Structures are given as C-alpha cells and as structure tokens.
Image (cartoon, rainbow, N blue to C red):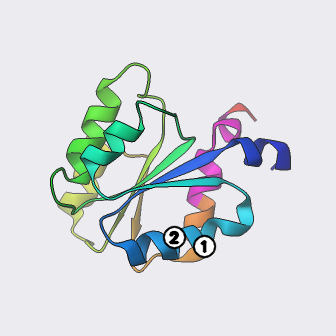
Amino acid sequence: MFMEESLQSSVLIVDDSVINTRVVTNMLADLGYKIHAAKDGLQALKLLTTFQPSVILMDITMPIMDGFECCRRIKQSASRAHIPVIFMSGSQDQRDITRATQVGGRGYLIKPINEEQLKSEVEFNMPWAEVS
C-alpha cells in the first residue's frame, strides 16, 4: 500500500451504534484513511451526494433504512455502483449473508468485528487493489 493513496482514500461507516462506529474507526486508525460516519441508510445516501468514499462498511439492522436497502440504492446509481460495500452484522444467518451478496455487497463481517479481518477486507477492496 502506498501511503499517498491511503491518505486520499476514505471509508464510510454506516451504523446506528456510536460504539460500533467508534470501535471500527479505532481499528482502521493506523491505516491512514479518512473516516466518515452515518447513523442510518438514509443519512448515508445523503452523504454520498457530497463525496465518494473508497469503501463503505454497512451495518444491516438500522432504523429508517436498513443496510440491504441502502446498498441496493447505492448499486442502482451509476455514479456510485462501483463503491465496494462490506456488510457488518451480528447475524450469522446464511439468508442474511446471501442477501448481502444479492444486493451488491462485496464482503460480510460478523460482529464482534475481528480487527485483522476488517483491515484485510478494507485493504482488499480499495480501488488500487483491483489494479494490481
């Protein structure tokens, strides 16, 4: 990873739990990404009109708009469809994991989040990771 690229890269964390957002932010802190946060899918969609993150980390169960619907809407937008969405959930239900893939998710992390898995998924889904 080139430090210059990581400084230009950003991660959007979409989770209604302030504690979960803080934990994930702390786990990613040493990678040098700019971190943005939204508390639900609707707020995430509004934020996406102002900037484009390199990767989105998305909780499934949230008020107002859940992660599945938010991801589906992101993938429907030509200007945002390329942004990788990695789901984060306490659910180990195969139906949720399958649905995450069906709506366009690129990964699925089970809470409590394993720091090494998180970093690996984020790094793997960064735009420059696809070039090499």
Name the residue tied to disc 1: 27
What amino acid does circle 2 point to?
Val
Identity of the residue drawn at 21% across and 63% down: 61
Taking depth in this image into account, of 88 and 12 the one nearest to the observer is 12
Identity of the residue drawn at 84% across and 50% down: 3
CB of mark 2 within 8 Å of CB of mark 1? yes
Q: Residues within 10 Å of mark 2 (few under 14, many from 20)?
A: some
The Cα atoms of the two marked residues, 2 and 1, are separated by 5 Å
Taking depth in this image into account, of 30 and 39 the one nearest to the observer is 39
Identity of the residue drawn at 52% across and 34% down: 52
Q: Where residue 90 sits in the image (x, y, percent)?
A: 29, 74
What main secondary structure does the magenta stretch of the protein show?
helix
Q: Is residue 125 magenta?
A: yes
Q: In screen coordinates, is 104 left or right of 123?
A: left
Name the residue tied to disc 2: 24
Which structural element holds mark 2? Answer: helix
Question: In this picture, which residue range is highlighted in magenta?
Answer: 121-130
Q: In screen coordinates, is 63 left or right of 28?
A: left
